[in-house]
Image (tube, coloured by chain):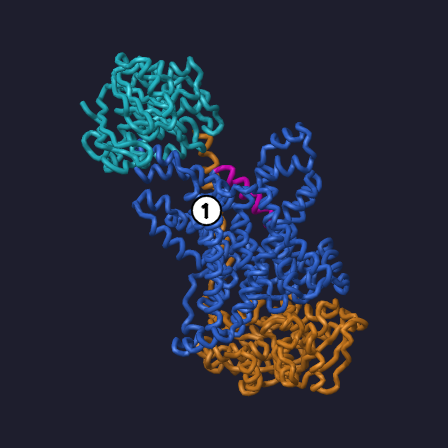
């Protein structure tokens, strides 16, 4: 029956044709160079539109000042970013405090290059829903009143949205088992923490103060429903970490050049101003591996660093 | 169909019974309901009507959508081919016809169970450790469990067919190989074509979910939008995904009506490789990363004992099973229940649109939305999972209902039966068998999916696994995967036993 | 010449051990009440059932160790027909010839049915119209399916033809045609519920409660013997 074979013949022809066309398009479309590409990535806690602008501008800036191809690789999961860094899929990553420590422990020789001016003294805030009846806390030992409350963290690997708040709770006698439901909830992000506390699903939440402030400034928070009850003592957080093999792949002294390029970003140039503004900083300042020893100790204590 | 001939006790009741869990779930949810999140939820649904049309955003999302589609298509075609091969090898009928022994097939079947019992997301995060960010990681993460699942479905189909023709042809002196092709393949192929087509839909959703957890594609974009609660951007991506799903379903339906499906699976790997080149998506041969991510064996061994002791297994397993049972109840029971309340075509179409929507929203998103309206309880986690899968089951049911011959219902109406009971016994009953056969596989999937609703405070093994992975606590990861595998195996054995008794 | 030999072959609980020799060119009818063991005997003849004791020999070899090439010389018209429902009439008829052709031929038959002319001849022989040739078997009526199974049997060209209740679903005229076709085969063993037709055969076997109690020429069988054969135990 020839009628039956026709669709098969047609499908074969179609796919072969398509494959051929794609191969032509593919050959002409993709740049095939063997030059090494500097792959930068970030633990994202920004909206994607902002991230794309942020890393687009930063890639251009670094590409120009370092004279290499720079590519931004989006990663949306903390553990994935750490693994990608270890495996060499990312060369230069904007890590949070905890994830940076995890990444360096798994990638011996990796180096902390820089942090923002605000990262040296970073803070988290505890926010509470008005209906919870919780009053602002004046000294840390009053954190015990959070026992038996429904509490939300952000992402499980977040330094400001989980690790440090949990640490300060523990220091003041509140273990995770003391919370309502036998443990904290995880909203997934700082913005989502605000949403679940504001809605009343959770009574208390802990998040990055920088994100809280920008939400307040943009009017995305209803002050009648949710308010800050406590601010943590300062700790170090976000930082740039570079893989150990950059000098080997891009030439002697390349890691230092990257550090210099980051530190020399100033608001005086148009692109520099844009990048710094998007990062929410005045400038980048130098940072060392040792700056994060305290975070590592806290991470070990809470079982997030093994 | 897997359960078709064996489920004797009124299948229609078995299909409706799981809906009983809706009652306690509803009571818990009503108790915990609050209005605090109404504003955000309203914002979410309003955003569905006015998604962001920013050209740069759309262009970017389209590029990412292609990566998701490419990953899904490649994974689908490879897993279909591998699954067919493995399924044939693990069928006891084929094995005993060719070699005279059953055990090699049984052994292979049991060996494949662990592959199936681990969620593609966990596979993705594990493979990421070994190969880094490479396009193949997401593809393989889907291929491993999918081919094992297809192998099971195929082997079940092959082994549960009644075999009169096979015996007749054997007695007529037909050699074993061609006998298997002639008397076994035609009945199996028809059932399998539906399943393979349906798996493409699943592969697309899996690829999206992998993206949500950081493995690239549109999912990554959606997660970033969700994390910052940019619902309008989120909906642009969701609508694009919906379009892609609709398009793929159309193509599959067209192709499977002819003989193009197998051809498509064969041609796709080639096409997608070239396509990835064009998208600048890294599909080069994955390389093993130097140095294992986990500590040396001696250290690991000590860690294993400690991890076993410090993990509250009873509580974790109990919660996981509870979520699975509740979510399966919702997923399996809700579609026939709602359809029974509204058996007419008009509401039926609305329900179908609802199922399509449920299926489109990834479980983490559904969970967040529910959490804005209710206190965090196990019930919320179960409902979030259940609703997502009820979308899948609802479409399976509608599909089954469309195939039912309307004459039974007409006959009952002619006999003076009320409209609703005529529908129940004339339409739903004949459709329930296929539906229930599918439901058995779905509860497998739901057990694995408990890994993705960690949002709600400490919800079981899945959440613990994500926590262990993010702490790089390898001994605990190892134990958790093992426990997951054992649970899946036990579930499978139990369902086999039940089928044999019925 | 003996082709099929039973040597104390039996099935526990269904058929008591029996000795029997079926010869080439002989037409045999199998009589007995329902449940007397007729289907079991046919099953032992074609090898779909294995004897619990004793053995069944085909041309001097143990039937269950016979190669496909030897087994295809035994053809069966099954009571439940055993067609491949998803295939077309012509494809089903061609499955009768699978034993004589290569694997490739068999695969081609699945993609595109072969030898339609031969199929038409066989369809005509069993009294079906050519229009059915490309229809799926699952859509046919009971009588039509019966004749497709018969056409498949004819396509096989067996040396020994077995048939289990081949006439039960047919009207009297059609039953007669089918019986004629079966009797045209060189040798056959046919189980029937119609003692009135026994004179068309050369040999009559009678089964009663799983025991072979009668083996004679039709002319030697009296009404009383038949009455006893069909009486309750």
Badge count? 1
The residue at which mark 1 appears reads as B500
Q: Is residue B160 visible?
A: yes
Does residue A233 lie above or below B150 as drawn? below
SS class, disc 1: helix
Q: Report in which chain the residue with disc 1 lies.
A: B
Q: Is residue B187 left or right of residue B401?
A: left
Q: Is residue A281 above or below residue B66?
A: below
Main secondary-structure element of the magenta-colored stretch: helix
Q: Residue at x 35, y 14 (%)?
A: C197
Q: Which residue is drawn at the image coordinates 37% and 44% (left, top)?
A: B93
What percent of the width, then of the height, locates residue A302? 56, 80
Q: Residues within 10 Å of mark 1 (few under 14, many from 20)?
A: few
| Image coords of residue C167 (percent x, y) | 40, 20
Picture colour for chain A: orange
In which quadrant of the rendered view does residue B342 lie?
Answer: top right
The colour assigned to chain B within the rendered structure: blue
* B83 up-or-down from C177: above or below: below
Magenta residues (range): B244-258
């Amino acid at each position: 029956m020839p009628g039956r074979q026709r669709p098969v013949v047609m499908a074969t022809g179609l796919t072969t044709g398509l494959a051929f066309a794609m191969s032509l398009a593919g050959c002409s479309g993709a740049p095939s160079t063997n030059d090494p590409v500097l792959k930068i990535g970030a633990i994202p806690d920004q909206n994607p539109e902002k991230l794309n602008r942020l890393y687009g501008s930063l890639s251009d800036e670094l590409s120009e000042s370092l004279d290499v191809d720079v590519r931004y690789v989006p990663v949306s999961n903390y553990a994935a970013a750490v693994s990608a860094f270890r495996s060499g899929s990312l060369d230069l990553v904007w890590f949070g405090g905890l994830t940076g420590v995890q990444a360096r422990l798994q990638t011996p020789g990796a180096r902390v290059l820089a942090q923002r001016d605000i990262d040296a003294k970073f803070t988290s805030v505890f926010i509470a829903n008005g209906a919870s009846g919780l009053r602002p806390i004046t000294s840390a030992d009053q954190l015990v009143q959070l026992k038996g409350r429904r509490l939300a963290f952000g992402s499980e690997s977040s330094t400001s949205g989980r690790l440090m708040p949990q640490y300060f709770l523990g220091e003041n006698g509140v273990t995770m088992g003391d919370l309502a439901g036998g443990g904290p909830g995880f909203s997934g992000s700082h913005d989502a923490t605000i949403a679940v506390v504001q809605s009343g699903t959770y009574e208390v939440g802990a998040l990055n103060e920088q994100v809280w402030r920008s939400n307040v400034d943009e009017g995305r928070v209803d002050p009648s429903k949710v308010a800050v009850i406590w601010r943590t003592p300062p700790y170090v957080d976000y930082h740039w970490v570079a893989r150990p093999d950059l000098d080997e792949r891009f030439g002697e002294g390349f890691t230092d050049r990257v550090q210099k390029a980051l530190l020399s970003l100033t608001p005086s140039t148009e692109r520099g101003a844009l990048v710094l503004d998007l990062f929410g900083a005045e400038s980048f300042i130098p940072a060392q591996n040792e700056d994060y020893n305290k975070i590592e100790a806290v991470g070990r204590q809470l079982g997030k660093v093994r | 169909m897997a359960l078709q001939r064996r489920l004797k006790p009124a299948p229609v009741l078995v299909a409706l019974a799981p809906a009983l869990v809706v009652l306690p779930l509803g009571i818990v949810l009503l108790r915990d309901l609050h209005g605090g999140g109404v504003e955000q939820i309203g914002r979410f649904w309003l955003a569905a009507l006015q998604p962001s049309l920013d050209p740069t955003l759309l262009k970017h999302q389209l590029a990412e959508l292609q990566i998701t589609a490419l990953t899904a298509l490649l994974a689908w075609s490879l897993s279909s081919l591998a699954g067919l091969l493995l399924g044939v090898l693990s069928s006891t009928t084929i094995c005993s016809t060719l070699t005279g022994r059953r055990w090699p097939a049984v052994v292979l079947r049991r060996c494949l169970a662990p592959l199936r019992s681990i969620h593609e997301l966990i596979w993705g995060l594990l493979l990421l450790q070994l190969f880094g960010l490479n396009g193949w990681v997401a593809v393989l993460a889907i291929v491993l469990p999918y081919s094992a699942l297809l192998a099971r479905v195929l082997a079940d189909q092959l082994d549960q067919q009644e075999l009169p023709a096979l015996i007749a042809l054997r007695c007529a002196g037909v050699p074993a190989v061609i006998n298997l092709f002639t008397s076994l393949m035609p009945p199996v192929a028809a059932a399998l074509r539906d399943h393979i087509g349906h798996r493409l839909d699943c592969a697309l959703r899996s690829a999206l979910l992998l993206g949500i957890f950081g493995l690239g594609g549109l999912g990554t974009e959606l997660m970033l939008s969700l994390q910052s609660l940019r619902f309008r951007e989120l909906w642009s991506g969701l609508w694009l995904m919906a379009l892609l799903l609709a398009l793929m379903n159309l193509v599959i339906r067209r192709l499977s009506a002819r003989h193009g499906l197998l051809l498509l699976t064969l041609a796709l790997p080639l096409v997608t490789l070239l396509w990835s080149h064009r998208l600048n998506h890294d599909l080069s041969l994955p390389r093993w990363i130097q140095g294992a991510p986990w500590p040396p064996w001696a250290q690991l061994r000590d860690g294993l004992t400690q991890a076993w002791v410090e993990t509250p297994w009873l509580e974790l397993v109990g919660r996981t099973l509870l979520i699975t049972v509740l979510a399966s109840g919702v997923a399996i029971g809700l579609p026939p229940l709602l359809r029974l309340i509204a058996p007419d075509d008009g509401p039926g179409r609305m329900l179908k649109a609802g199922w399509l929507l449920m299926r489109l929203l990834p479980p983490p998103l559904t969970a967040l939305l529910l959490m804005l309206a209710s206190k965090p309880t196990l019930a919320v986690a179960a409902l979030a999972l259940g609703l997502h899968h009820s979308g899948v089951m609802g479409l399976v049911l509608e599909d089954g209902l469309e195939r039912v011959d309307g004459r039974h219902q007409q006959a009952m109406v002619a006999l003076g039966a009320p409209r609703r009971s005529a529908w129940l016994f004339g339409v739903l009953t004949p459709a329930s068998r296929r539906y229930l056969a599918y439901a058995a596989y779905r509860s497998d999937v739901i057990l694995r999916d408990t890994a993705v609703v960690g949002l709600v405070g400490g919800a079981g093994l899945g959440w613990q696994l994500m926590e262990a992975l993010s702490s790089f606590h390898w001994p605990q990861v190892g134990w958790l995967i093992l426990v997951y595998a054992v649970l899946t195996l036990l579930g499978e054995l139990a369902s086999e036993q039940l089928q044999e008794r019925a | 010449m003996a082709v099929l030999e039973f040597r104390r072959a039996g099935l526990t609980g269904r058929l008591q051990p029996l000795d029997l020799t079926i010869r080439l060119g002989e037409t045999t009818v199998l009589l007995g009440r329902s449940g007397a063991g007729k289907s079991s005997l046919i099953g032992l003849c074609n090898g779909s059932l294995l004897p619990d004791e004793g053995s069944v020999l085909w041309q001097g070899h143990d039937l269950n160790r016979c190669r496909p090439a030897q087994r295809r010389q035994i053809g069966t018209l099954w009571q439940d027909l055993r067609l491949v429902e998803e295939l077309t009439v012509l494809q089903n008829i061609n499955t009768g010839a699978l034993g004589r052709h290569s694997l490739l031929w068999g695969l081609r038959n699945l993609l595109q049915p072969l030898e339609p002319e031969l199929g038409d001849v066989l369809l005509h022989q069993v009294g079906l119209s050519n229009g059915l040739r490309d229809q799926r078997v699952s859509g046919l009526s009971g009588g039509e399916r019966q004749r497709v199974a018969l056409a498949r049997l004819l396509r096989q060209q067996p040396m020994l033809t077995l048939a289990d209740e081949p006439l039960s679903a047919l009207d009297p005229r059609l039953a007669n045609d089918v019986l004629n076709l079966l009797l045209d085969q060189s040798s056959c063993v046919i189980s029937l519920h119609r003692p009135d037709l026994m004179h068309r055969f050369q040999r009559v076997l009678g089964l009663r409660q799983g025991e072979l109690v009668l083996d004679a020429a039709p002319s030697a069988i009296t009404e009383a013997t038949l009455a006893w054969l069909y009486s309750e135990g």
